[in-house]
């Protein structure tokens, strides 16, 4: 029987109740670390994401992000991004699902919610970048943009670095003020909310790691002012994911060692879209394969546009827990006819 496992949000919730947020985040970070160290573009193929962008009935996009393990599985994440969802519809700005397909038969093996997983895998990638590019000691963290992504960013970074202090800025100051209560209990640092006309200028100073996680509109950036900073400042820039969207001043991006998650994608729609390939540093997987400890003492930027391989990794971690715990709904979604040459056999 051609069965498909459906891992809906109830199954995801049950996994987290069973294993805890910290362990789940650690599992995704470790799985990503192993996968990136072993990454071979001949064995794992990712295709540039594409989709539909529109401004009617509201500004948004629906796009798909495919990955294939040669001889293994194909995963396709379908994601909708609508920045007005939280304020106008009380929904997350990112709504996503991931499907996994068997490359032997083409069968749909699994379908998972990926809204939660997108936040987790984006945080996990930043954790690996922070591990590679920031000094290995307690850090002062600053966050610009205090929506959903900021929570998983802080959580993931706390799994690889002790966070000594957190400063937070959001144009909607009430969102920044709720950040502390949204963080997991394992994140113990207090959150200082920064506001006022000079808030953008104050976010670089006295900061070891800066996270920019905003929904800035195309051509409306940057979201932080360039200025004096610690020599080893590391920035995880996660909000630039569309042509014209940038969060960092070009002057800062150009003097930093800029590490893309995926070179081609970052040149098209990340912080790197104002630069050329020869101005960029190694991709993140290359750093995992050949670490450069000296970069921990330089100005660095992780250009995180969201690599499709990360979605496959997160989905496999989730499905592994579902299988072990006996969670998820198994359904006979696709036909399994007695006569494969008869398209009507399965419905007779």
Image: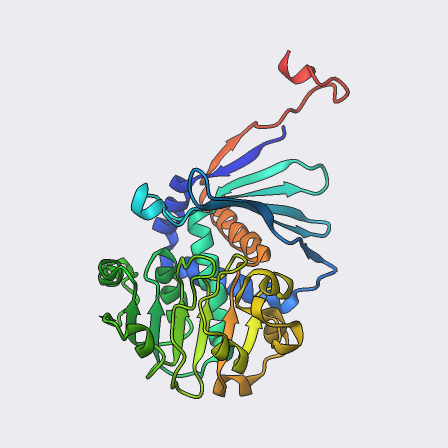
Q: Quadrant of residue 228?
A: bottom left
Q: Of 274 and 298, which appears nearest the observer?
A: 274
Furthest residue in direction right, as rendered: 341
Q: Quadrant of residue 159?
A: bottom left
Q: Of 97 and 3, which appears nearest the observer?
A: 97
Q: Is residue 211 above or below residue 16?
A: below
Q: Quadrant of residue 176?
A: bottom left
Residue 165 position, x and y percent, is 28, 76
Residue 250 position, x and y percent, is 50, 75
In which quadrant will I find the C terminus?
top right
Residue 247 position, x and y percent, is 44, 67
Say whether residue 191 is visible: no
Q: Is residue 297 above or below residue 301?
A: below
Q: Residue at x 60, y 72 (%)?
A: 275
Q: Of 179 and 324, which appears nearest the observer?
A: 179
Q: Of 246 and 325, which appears nearest the observer?
A: 246
Q: Residue at x 62, y 75 (%)?
A: 282
Q: Is residue 14 above or below residue 300?
A: above
Q: Is residue 330 left or right of residue 205?
A: right
Say whether residue 177 is visible: yes
Q: Is residue 315 left or right of residue 94?
A: right
Q: Residue at x 51, y 65 (%)?
A: 304
In which quadrant will I find the N terminus?
top right
Furthest residue in direction top, as rendered: 348
């Amino acid at each position: 029987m051609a069965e498909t496992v459906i891992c809906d949000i109830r199954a995801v919730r049950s996994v987290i109740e069973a294993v805890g947020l910290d362990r789940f985040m650690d599992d995704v970070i470790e799985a990503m670390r192993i996968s990136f160290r072993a990454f071979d573009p001949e064995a794992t193929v990712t295709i540039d994401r594409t989709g539909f962008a529109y401004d009617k009935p509201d500004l948004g996009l629906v796009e798909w992000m495919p990955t294939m393990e040669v001889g293994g599985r194909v995963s396709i994440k379908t994601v909708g991004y609508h920045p007005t969802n939280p304020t106008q519809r009380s929904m997350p700005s990112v709504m996503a699902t991931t499907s996994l397909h068997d490359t032997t038969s083409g069968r749909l093996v699994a379908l998972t919610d990926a809204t939660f997983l997108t936040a987790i895998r984006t945080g996990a990638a930043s954790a690996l970048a922070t591990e590679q590019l920031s000094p290995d000691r307690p850090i002062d963290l600053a966050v610009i943009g205090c929506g959903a992504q900021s929570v998983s960013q802080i959580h993931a970074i706390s799994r690889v670095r002790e966070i000594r202090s957190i400063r937070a800025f959001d144009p909607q100051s009430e969102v920044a003020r709720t950040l502390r209560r949204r963080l997991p209990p394992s994140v113990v640092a207090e959150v200082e909310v920064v506001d006022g006309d000079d808030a953008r200028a104050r976010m670089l100073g006295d900061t070891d790691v800066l996270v920019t996680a905003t929904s800035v509109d195309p051509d409306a950036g940057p979201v932080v002012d360039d200025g004096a900073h610690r020599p080893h400042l590391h920035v995880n820039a996660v909000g630039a994911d569309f042509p014209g969207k940038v969060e960092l001043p070009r002057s800062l991006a150009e003097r930093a060692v800029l590490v893309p998650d995926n070179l081609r994608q970052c040149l098209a729609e990340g912080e790197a879209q104002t630069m050329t390939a020869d101005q960029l540093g190694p991709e993140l997987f290359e750093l995992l394969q050949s670490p450069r400890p000296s970069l921990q003492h330089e100005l660095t930027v992780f250009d995180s546009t969201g690599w499709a391989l990360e979605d496959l990794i997160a989905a496999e971690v989730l499905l592994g827990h579902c299988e072990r715990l006996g969670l998820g709904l198994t359904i006979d979604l696709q036909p399994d006819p007695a006569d494969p040459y008869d398209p009507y056999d399965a419905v007779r």
